[in-house]
Image (cartoon, rainbow, N blue to C red):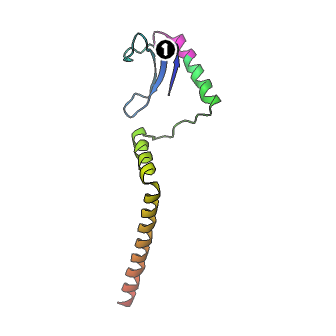
Amino acid sequence: KALFKGDYKIMYNMGPVGDDEWHLFNIVTDPGEVLDLKQTMPERFDSMMADYQVYEKNNRILPLPAGYIQQRQVGLNGLRDRFGAKIFTFMLTLLILVAFYLVYKSRRKSLA
């Protein structure tokens, strides 16, 4: 989550790596985003947060679900994009083979 307005940027630093907090930076004088201005410029921060909340509402942005981990989702999306239909076919084949194996074991057990 981020919003740029002039020389300033607010951003949400999402966990698990981030601190789950919003920050305010001047991206012109502090391009490395080292100095958080949220405490020293509360009016600007509040104004930009209000703008971001309007943006969220107007664009129907949904909150992330509890336990969301970006790295995991990126990995899952990559697997789906690369192997999507193949994974489904593999899982279906595996399910059918397991079912046949269980039927085979139960019949063999009943004959003994």
Q: Nearer the viewer, residue 32 or 52?
A: 32
Q: Position of residue 67 (x, y in %)?
A: 45, 41
Question: Is 98 left or right of 7, judged from the image as shown?
Answer: left
Q: Position of residue 57 (x, y in %)?
A: 63, 29
Amino acid type, residue under disc 1 in the picture: Tyr
Question: Is 110 left or right of 46, judged from the image as shown?
Answer: left
For mark 1, does the 10 Å Cα neighbourhood hold few (<14), some (14 to 19), or many (20 or more) residues?
some
Residue drawn at (55%, 35%) of the image: 63
Q: Which residues are magenta?
A: 38-47
Q: Quadrant of residue 106?
A: bottom left
Q: Which residue is mark 1?
A: 8
Residue drawn at (39%, 29%) of the image: 18
- Split into 4 quadrants, where in the image is the C terminus? bottom left
Q: Position of residue 53 (x, y in %)?
A: 59, 25
Query: Is 43 within the magenta?
Result: yes
Residue 3 in the image: above or below residue 90: above
Q: Quadrant of residue 83?
A: bottom left
Residue drawn at (38%, 90%) of the image: 111
Q: Nearer the viewer, residue 61 or 106?
A: 61
Q: Report the label total.
A: 1
Q: Given the current orientation, which residue lies at the most extreme bottom position?
A: 111
Query: Is 56 within the magenta?
Result: no
Residue 79 in the image: above or below residue 34: below
Q: Position of residue 36 (x, y in %)?
A: 41, 15
